[in-house]
Every structure is written in C-alpha cells, then in structure tokens.
C-alpha cells in the first residue's frame, strides 16, 4: 500500500496503490475505500500511463465523507501531478470541483496531503516545486457550491533554495493550524541542511512558536510530521528526522514530539520526553559483500490524543527498512507504538514491536493511528503472493479498576468474599456453623 488513511472513528479506510494490466507497458493508480466491515465502498482510478507507475497519496477527512487523492494525470500531451477531491456521502464517490494542478510530473514524489476533521480544509505539499524550493497550499472545499478555492497565498521555501518545503504536511483537526516539513532547510549560520518543521496559523499565515530545526546536518528533519490540537490552547507536533545518526550509525532515524502552549506570552515549542530513536543504522559488511540501509525510523508517523480529559498522547512510528537479518534484500519493517501521559516524563512503548512477516514486507511504509490511539493501520509492500498489504490492529486494554457490571464469564479462581445473594443450589460441603433457621424438610 503506497498510502493509507482512516476516519477518526476507524469506520472507513482508504488504501492507494498502482497496477499494470499488461506486464509493465501501462500503469494505473487507484484508491480503494472500505467501510468498517471491510466491504468495498468504491474504487477511484487514474488514467492509464505508459511506463510510469503513479505514486498515489490519499487522505480522508476525520468524519470519513471527503477524500483527496494526489496522483499523476495526463493533460493533452503532458503528464501533470495534481489532486482530485471526492464526496463520499452518497452511494458512490463523486468528484468535487476541478482538479488542483500541482505542477510538472516531477513534483509528484513530494506531493503530500492532509485534511481537516470536517473535510472543509485541505493542505497540499509539493516538495519539488521550483526545482526544490517547495511549497504548501491550503484550500477550502465546498460541497454546496461544488468548488475548491485557494485560501491565502500559501507557504513557500526561501527563494532559490532547496528547502523542499512541503516534504510533509499536517492540519489540526479544525484546520486552524498547519505543520509543514522541509527536509532541505538550512539553519542560519550552518553550511548544510538539517531540515525543519514550521507551524502556521492558516488564517493569518503567521509562523507560531518559532522554527523547529534538525539537531545535526543532513538529518532530513521534517520528512514526516503530524500535528494534534488537544485543547484550545495546546498543540503537539511529532517530527521525524529519518537520516539521524547515533553512535556512528547512519540513517538510524528518530522522532521528537514538541508542545506549544498558546496561552503563554511568547509561546515556543518545547520538547516532550526523550527522542524516540531507531534500532539500527546502515550496515556495510565488506567480507560478505552485504549492505543494509538504516531503519529510517519515522518514515511514517501517527500522533493521536487519547480518549479522556487528561490530554494523554500516543504516537505510532514506522520503519519500513528495519530488519534483524542484515541482508541486502531483507526489509521486514517495523511499527512501534508509544504512550505519554501527564503523570510520567518519558514515552513508554505499548505492547510489542509490530514486525513484518517476510523480507519484502516493508511494514510501516504508511500508517494511520485513529480512534484515540486505539486503532492502528499499517501498510507495507509485497508479501508472499500479494502486491501489497494493510493490517489493522485494535488495542485491547484492561482497567486497574473493578467493573460495576457483572461478568458473564465465570471466574477461574473462587472469590475470597462471601456472596450477598443466596445460592439456588445446595452445597456439597457441610456448613461450619449451625443454621439459625429451622429446615423445612425433616432430617
């Protein structure tokens, strides 16, 4: 699966991919939309392209009734990258307005999308715009007028730079804020790019909280980003630096989570907990002629506010290049889930590593974390006879508090407390104390 997206409640999922009906002569992109029972709701297809397998990106609105699809499509004699938006509230997907043209076909590998909860706002990132300057634009979607309208002037990388702004994009649930990653951004005073993430108010288009820069050169900070607003004054953003090195292990990758309290006079982004770092860097084994790239931890990201009023968070992190078998063609992939609450100071891993089943799984190429962090969808590459795979996990948890509702399942252990309800069955064990009530049957 090239890209996956789920509605907030997990009742709808969209999965993108590409296929060839004639062994590589022509290719077609598609998005399949499934409802909660995994029954196919609809399929949206691109046109056929010669010798080009389109990279299709997809995003669903939080309520699951609006979908945006970034792809390549032909215009006269050329191929153009762009975005089409569809209404899913009827019996079949219906296109809204005209396609958003995003530029030359070369822009497509950088085409990133996100949508607000109600589907009225869409952000489109194009990291290769103007030879690598990059840009991100926010649009307003109206189903009533069947239109898609550019909001404001958009956000661009520095003139003449290779900022690659738009490498990643994420909207807050209400569309009021947008986070934009630029893997080529160079911090003032540095010679090499570390990458960065910038968060803007979508109405005023003003930067808020300052720029979040990578910690070292060539980290590719901003490759992935996810922005969550937990209340009126508090924002969190998860930022991936997939080429981060640690202990001489290149491309190990890391994820940092930052918090912004807008109620402060001069709010700035503050790091929450320690960095989450990948397991392995690149491996070069000259004696056996083997090379394995690093994990690139953070290749995919999902940040979610958990249910309840505490503002607890969960973050899911994908590493499609992970493998304990350090062979050149072994990419099992892994996804890890972490939790952070106000009662602790560090991120704690939940459950176990979710590792792909085969060398070609590349599990974690794409992920979606929804339903208060309790539902996790993981997309990967070919596995066995399949051309791609998506696995959906539901987090099952037990409470430390007793339930007020009696269980329908008998306990494995006898209770240490006597029951307040008399038994309807005679006991096979004589009582230790004589009864104070005479028997109704003679002995």
Image (spheres, grey):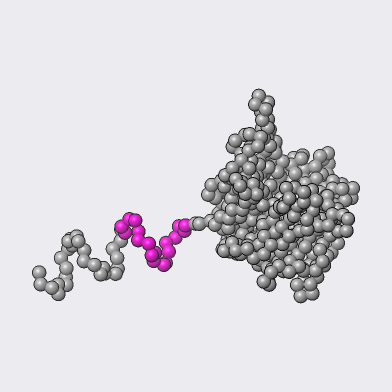
Among all residues in the image, which is located at the extreme left? Answer: 443
Q: How far across and how far down the image is residue 137, in percent? A: 81, 59
Among all residues in the image, which is located at the extreme top? Answer: 287
Quadrant where the C terminus is found in the figure: bottom left
- Residue drawn 54% across the image and 50% down it: 350
Q: Locate residue 27 relative to residue 338 in the image: left or right.
A: right
Q: How far across and how far down the image is residue 121, in percent? A: 75, 65
| Secondary structure mostly seen in the magenta stretch | loop
Q: Nearer the viewer, residue 177 or 443?
A: 443
Q: How far across and how far down the image is residue 212, in percent? A: 75, 49
- The vertical placement of 403 against 219, above or below, is below
Q: Nearer the viewer, residue 253 or 334?
A: 334
- Residue drawn 88% across the image and 55% down it: 77
- Residue drawn 21% across the image and 63% down it: 427
Q: Is any atom of residue 403 visible in this view?
A: yes
- Residue drawn 85% across the image and 49% down it: 133
Q: Is any atom of residue 174 visible in this view?
A: no
Among all residues in the image, which is located at the extreme right? Answer: 160
- Asked if the stretch drawn in magenta spans residue 381, the answer is no
Q: Locate residue 395 relative to residue 48 in the image: left or right.
A: left
Q: Locate residue 393 relative to residue 427 in the image: left or right.
A: right
Bounds of the magenta segment: 398-415
Q: Nearer the viewer, residue 192 or 440?
A: 440
Q: Residue 305, located in which quarter of the rendered image?
A: bottom right
- The vertical placement of 64 against 288, above or below, is below
Q: How far across and how far down the image is residue 378, in percent? A: 62, 52
Q: Residue 360, located in which quarter of the rendered image?
A: top right
């Amino acid at each position: 699966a090239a890209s996956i997206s789920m509605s907030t409640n997990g009742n709808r999922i969209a999965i993108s991919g590409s296929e060839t009906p004639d062994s590589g002569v022509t290719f077609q992109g598609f998005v399949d939309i499934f409802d909660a029972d995994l029954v196919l709701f609809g399929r949206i297809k691109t046109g056929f392209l010669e010798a080009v397998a389109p990279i299709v990106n997809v995003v669903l609105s939080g309520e699951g009734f609006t979908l945006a699809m970034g792809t390549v499509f032909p215009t006269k004699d050329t191929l153009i990258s762009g975005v089409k938006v569809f209404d899913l509230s009827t019996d079949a997907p219906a296109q809204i307005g005209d396609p958003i043209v995003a530029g030359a076909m070369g822009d497509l590998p950088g085409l990133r999308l996100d949508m607000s909860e109600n589907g009225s706002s869409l952000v489109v990132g194009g990291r290769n715009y103007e030879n690598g300057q990059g840009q991100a634009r926010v649009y307003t979607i109206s189903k009533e007028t069947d239109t898609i309208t550019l909001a404001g002037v958009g956000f661009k990388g520095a003139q003449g730079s290779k900022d690659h702004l738009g490498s990643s994009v994420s909207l807050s649930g209400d569309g009021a804020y947008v986070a934009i990653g630029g893997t080529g951004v160079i911090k003032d005073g540095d010679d090499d790019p570390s990458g960065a993430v910038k968060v803007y108010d979508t109405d005023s288009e003003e930067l808020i909280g300052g720029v979040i820069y990578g910690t070292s050169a060539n980290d590719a900070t901003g490759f992935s980003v996810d922005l969550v607003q937990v209340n009126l004054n508090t924002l969190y953003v998860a930022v991936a630096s997939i080429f981060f090195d640690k202990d001489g292990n290149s491309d190990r990758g890391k994820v940092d989570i930052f918090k912004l309290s807008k109620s402060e006079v001069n709010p700035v982004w503050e790091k929450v907990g320690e960095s989450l770092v990948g397991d392995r860097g690149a491996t070069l084994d000259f004696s056996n002629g083997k090379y394995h790239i690093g994990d690139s931890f953070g290749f995919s990201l999902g940040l979610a506010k958990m249910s309840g009023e505490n503002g607890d968070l969960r973050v899911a992190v994908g590493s499609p290049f992970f493998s304990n078998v350090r062979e050149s063609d072994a990419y099992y992939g892994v996804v890890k889930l972490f939790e952070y609450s106000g009662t602790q100071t560090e991120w704690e891993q939940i459950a176990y590593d979710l590792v792909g089943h085969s060398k070609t799984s590349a599990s974690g190429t794409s992920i979606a974390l929804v339903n208060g962090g309790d539902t996790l969808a993981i997309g990967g590459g070919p596995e066995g006879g399949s051309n791609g795979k998506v696995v959906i996990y539901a987090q099952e948890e037990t409470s430390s508090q007793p339930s007020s509702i009696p269980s329908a399942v008998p306990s494995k252990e006898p209770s240490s407390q006597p029951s307040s309800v008399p038994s309807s069955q005679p006991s096979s064990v004589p009582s230790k104390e004589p009864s104070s009530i005479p028997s109704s049957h003679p002995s």
